[in-house]
Amino acid sequence: MDIPSPTKLKGKFVGILVCWILGFGSLIAWNSLMSIGDYYYALFPNYHPSRVLTLVYQPFALGTIVILAYNEAKVDTRKRILVGYTLYTLSTLTLILLDLASSGRGGIGNYIGVCAIVGCFGIGDAIVQGGMTGDLSFMCPEFIQSFFAGLAASGAVTSGLRLMAKAAFENSNNGLRKGVMLFLAISVFFEFLCILLYAFIFPKLPIVKHYRTKAALEGSTTVAADLAAAGIETQSIEKANNDAKQSERLSTKQLFFQNIDYELDLYLIYVATLSIFPGFLYENTGTHTLGSWYALVLIAMYNVWDLIGRYVPLIDKIKLKSRKGLMIAILSRFLLVPCFYFTAKYGDQGWMIFLVSFLGLTNGHLTVCVMTAAPKGYKGPEQNALGNLLVLFILCGICSGVALDWLWIIGNGKF
């Protein structure tokens, strides 16, 4: 089966834009929760909401991605991703309804309800992020870079909106709650938009059809439904799979050991980041002249520089490509932990803002460097499997970082 060169196909720019929106929509609800952390601290002041909600989120995400990474070759990518975005949409809508039903009151019952919804966000994250990363890993690197930039953009945009909402509603009755409802409504809109884009627009782009047909030729069984949705005949898919049987793909175990350094890279990036962000920034940075704005400004600065960092690798001359160089840079980030500790204790807010910005910049830059480098040189089915493995290690790193974040509480006697 002959397929044209991707350089001759249309739809690359639209594909990059759609990937950005799909990334944006997959984390906007979670980033909204992080940006409205001050609202949940007002409702549940004794329950460490920023830390607890993150801790609840991760086991659900991690457990789901372990199952899906192990069975990735058997899971229909189209159904998987559409289920994930639908779960996001319904969960965010339920969060709005819970707040409306309780009239914005606190209490342990409502807190448990919020935690249960956050668990659904974790499941949705594993379904969508693992599925999209695997799917985009056998396409052009610009797609996966754009998807991960969209993930960061959701944090930057929600932080910016949170600052504007605080300024607009701060002196009005229930101002904080009005801002939260606005945030969650925006999240529902973008999550529903992602369902439509992935179902009806993305699979029909010529460049996407090219890469998925190529993956089918190489033995991928996860793209069949997307190819059918794009109008490619079933006979073509069957022939591609029959041809691919002549060559074997590497097992998930072989991919795991061949890419152990990349997997450790991602794990360590997120251990370092999540041991500081967001819990430490809400609870351990002291009192400063910015007052109640301080934590929001720190969260916003992290998110903005994380977004910038994910575009820096587009400049080829400063993109980290060496596997050893990546590992050295990633290990060096752990020096930020004592820097944050001593800055919180003895430094002023300017130094803290600088450190948070650097944390975000390095997080975004190093993540994209690893995610675009690792899949190179493999066949489509192998790239899909490797994409799921990489997301597994991101979530493992996040889970470990969140657990370490609690040491800040224990060390300060606040537990």
Image: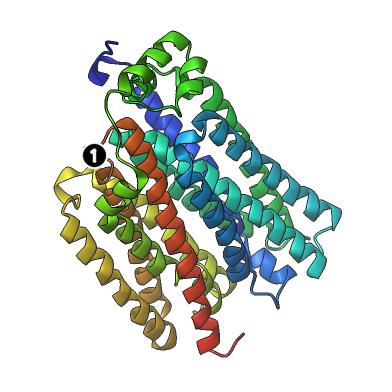
Say which residue label 1 marks: 376
The foreground one among 164 and 333 is 333
Q: Up-down: is 176 above or below 94?
A: below
The foreground one among 331 and 78 is 78
The C terminus - image quarter = bottom right
User: Measuring 59% from the left and 72% from the top, which residue is drawn there?
Assistant: 292
User: Measuring 85% from the left and 53% from the top, which residue is drawn there?
Assistant: 101
Colour pattern of the rendering: rainbow
* Mark 1 nearby-residue class (10 Å; few <14, some 14–19, many ≥20): few
The foreground one among 381 and 362 is 381
Q: Up-down: is 261 above or below 378?
A: below
Q: Up-down: is 191 above or below 111?
A: above
The quarter holding residue 352 reads bottom left
Picture coordinates of residue 237 (x, y %)? 41, 15
Given the image, on which type of amino acid does mark 1 rest? Lys
Picture coordinates of residue 243 (x, y %)? 31, 18
User: Measuring 70% from the left and 75% from the top, which residue is drawn there?
Assistant: 45
The quarter holding residue 180 reads bottom right
Q: Is residue 29 visible?
A: no
Picture coordinates of residue 106 (x, y %)? 79, 67
The foreground one among 281 and 378 is 378
Name of the residue lying farthest toward the bottom:
413
